[in-house]
Image: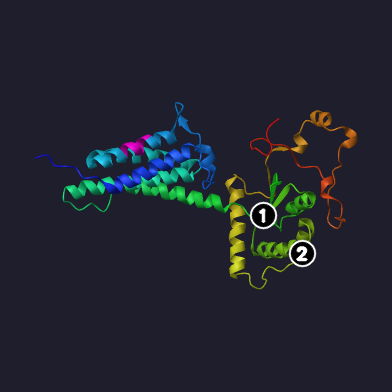
Amino acid sequence: MRRSREILFGALSVSTLATIFCVWTALGNDVNFCVTTGCSLYQDFSIGGFSLWWLGVAVFALLAALALLGAAGIGRALSGLALLTDMGLLLLMAFTAPCTSCLVVAFFFAVVYLCFRHAVHARAGQHMPRRSLILLCWLLLFAVNLGAVARSQLGVWPIMDAGEDVRTRLFFSPSCPSCRTAVEKLSGRVDVGFYPLAEDDSDIARVARMRDLLEQGQNPAQALQGVQELPADGPGLFSPAMLWLRFRLLCNKAHVFASDTQAVPFVEFHGLPAFLADKTRTENVTPPEKQRPTLEYPVGLDHSLPLETLEPLVSGRCGDASAPCP
């Protein structure tokens, strides 16, 4: 007598849920939970004009059909092949940038493979082996990408609130003379963000005091000047708040080091710096009589002048909807 095949409800449920998720993502989901760099990088990734999201829909739909038919052996083989292929994508993301949505799909592939694997051994009356080489390799790559996601979400820490107008980021150490000059020159500009880092414990104490002075209304140049004589072994240097500050400063320092330099001040321009702009093009856009003068705020100068009198350091920017290329 021919033995009827039972429906594999575990594999069917996971495959169906994964199929819905891939369709939802391919059509453009409204819930923006994928906030990593890789999400934008791989959103429209395709092979031969065929989106990988629709390929995921096809694979998960086929796995769901196999689970419905009770084909545990074929399902394990196909899900194992899909898991191996997905490991290639995980490896690519590990060397480029992680994608949160892609990691969700990778998790679905692993769970479906486990469900089919368990069904095969259950039908054979065997205990499922505790270890699987393919799953161990997958888990290693998955953990690497999870770590990269966590690292990307920490980001760098500005000592002042960095709004959407920030187009230039200055990384500085309070004990660096060149950094102090840079802070003095850039202080007062609304399009500049200030990101401190620490060379030693004295810098940590100075940054903590500098943050207090900024909250009292001083500008970065004044606050930096006011912490130069601060002792290094201040009270509470290893308190929970100061340990959290140490971690933030370490993230800023890691960002500078990751840019293949250990020198400060370190300046990042998110767009074309104004001093590189075509002066002829600028003059054609803005008549000379309406051009605004550039003012710099040295230490001790009255800062009551309006910030609108300062020219932005970045005169051109491409790549987002708020400032499209002309």
Q: Is residue 83 left or right of residue 4?
A: right
Q: Is residue 312 left or right of residue 130?
A: right
Mark 2 surroundings within 10 Å by alpha-carbon count, few (fewer than 14), some (14 through 19), many (20 or more): few
Q: Quadrant of residue 6?
A: top left
Pick the residue in front: 266 or 194: 194
Residue at the spot 38% in from the left edge and 45% down from the top edge: 17
Mark 2 highlights which residue? 216
Q: Position of residue 34 (x, y in %)?
A: 51, 46
Specify which label sits upstream in the sequence, 2 or 1.
Answer: 1
Residue at the spot 60% in from the left edge and 70% down from the top edge: 239
Mark 1 surroundings within 10 Å by alpha-carbon count, few (fewer than 14), some (14 through 19), many (20 or more): some
Under mark 2, the amino acid is: Gln
Evaluate whether residue 13 shows in this view. yes
Q: Residue furthest bottom?
A: 235
Distance CA(mark 2)–CA(mark 1): 17 Å
Q: Residue furthest right?
A: 289
219 relative to 93, above or below = below
Magenta residue span: 58-63
Q: Is residue 18 left or right of residue 163?
A: left
Q: Residue furthest top?
A: 48
Q: Which mark is residue 275?
A: none
- In the rendered image, which quarter contains the N terminus? top left
Please report contact status of discs 2 and 1: CB closer than 8 Å, yes or no: no
Colour logic: rainbow
Q: Position of residue 25 (x, y in %)?
A: 47, 40
Q: Position of residue 220 (x, y in %)?
A: 76, 56
324 falls in the magenta region: no
Q: Position of residue 231 (x, y in %)?
A: 71, 69
Mark 1 highlights which residue? 158
Our reading of the magenta stretch's main secondary structure is: helix
| Total numbered circles | 2
Residue at the spot 29% in from the left edge and 38% down from the top edge: 65
